[in-house]
Image (tube, rainbow, N blue to C red):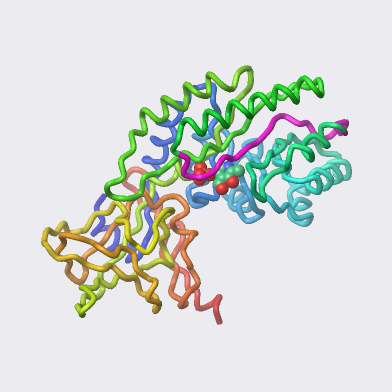
Amino acid sequence: MDYEKIVSEHQTPVYVYDVDILENRVAYLRNYLGENVNIVYAVKANTFVMPFVHPYVDALELCSFGEYEIAVKGKVPYEKMVISGVYKDEASMRAMFNGEIPRRFTIESLQQWNLLSKLCREYGKTIEVLLRLTSGNQFGMCKENLESILDQNDDEFIKIVGIQYFSKTQRHSLSILEKELDKLNTYIDELEHRYDIRIEEFEYGPGFPVYYFEGDEFDEESFLKGFSEILKKTIKNRKINIELGRSIAASCGEYITRVVDLKKNETGTYAIVDGGINHIAYYGQTMAIKVPHNEVVPKRDGNESYIVCGSLCTINDILVKNFQNKNLQIGDLIVFKNAGAYCSTEGISLFLSRDLPRVLVKIQEKIIEVRGSFKTSSLNG
Ligand SMILES: Cc1ncc(COP(=O)(O)O)c(C=O)c1O
């Protein structure tokens, strides 16, 4: 990528999401998971790419009314929408029922079941649902609640099509995933026998990992082959939908920030950049000890070690504590890689009233600015 050209036209700090990388990424995952496995994109990872990625995935998981609004604006087909989320408020649900109805909803509590059942009747509309089983947190339902829905399952407007289960993000142990899938399949079989029903689908969030930091090693190909074998072994006679956020979106994104000041004191050599932890947060980063995959533009070799700090007036605003073997100059760009999932939304964006960065989407050689720089002072004052 010609970073100098991009920033000369759009300035720093800036995110760039490359749609070609995203498309190839989905094709890569599909290749290992197999054609029989549906891929569901959990859009919380990156909503900017939704309008570009929806043709390549089988469904999109939307967890808030905001995500739904972005999906509508991005022309995501309603039959690809899965409305999920721990809080489905009545006003938002009504707004959805008032228009063209998303095909599918998840049910995460008895209250959600009652609400959707009421709305289906009132609007005379039919929906498909996935009953979400909890993985031991605030999401989904315990077995008792889930089964109480199956006990009274005579709702003519709601079709229960499957069970949803989200494991945990950044799961890299195949043996843990195998045990979990085995147990879940046994449980779903049990439900089918006990209630004399057919549970057609199983929607599973395996939390495929992304390796963000220098020195982390990951043989993704073996991991995906192994996972695919496990799926074939454990989930039989059921349609499988794999929900992924991080693993789909991370690699398509880069965050570019510029060195704006250099200084030394008894604690080290500091490189101040125009971005900061308000713009970029990496899962698993603690105290800026790890070095995210990065590139310095122009390329510079040296033997100086820098503490790379952002522009927030807090001592916590350190991006990398030990940025080694460099010879940074004011004006240099630091490009942080694998920044396509969560990195832009998990930062403390409103702190110190610094502007939000621009967001660019790259399609082949074309760059589109999908969000301009945004003044947070208008929100904080
Ligand atoms: C239900 C569900 N599915 C999928 C995901 C995406 O997880 P990941 O980004 O680890 O793939 C999440 C993340 O919180 C989730 O809650």
Residue reaching furthest to the left: 302
Q: Nearer the viewer, residue 82 or 196?
A: 196
Q: Is residue 51 visible?
A: no
Query: Which quadrant: the C terminus?
Result: bottom right
Q: Nearer the viewer, residue 189 or 359?
A: 189
Image coordinates for residue 283, horizontal then vertical, percent: 43, 53
Q: Is residue 212 visible?
A: yes
Q: In the displayed structure, would residue 347 be above or below residue 49? A: below
Determine whether, in the image, residue 219 is placed left or right of residue 128: left
The answer to which quarter of the image holds residue 129 is top right
Range covered by the magenta-colored residues? 152-171
Is residue 18 shown in magenta? Answer: no
Residue at (66%, 27%) from the top-left corner? Answer: 201
Is residue 167 shown in magenta? Answer: yes
Image coordinates for residue 32, horizontal then vertical, percent: 43, 26
Residue at (42%, 59%) from the top-left corner? Answer: 281
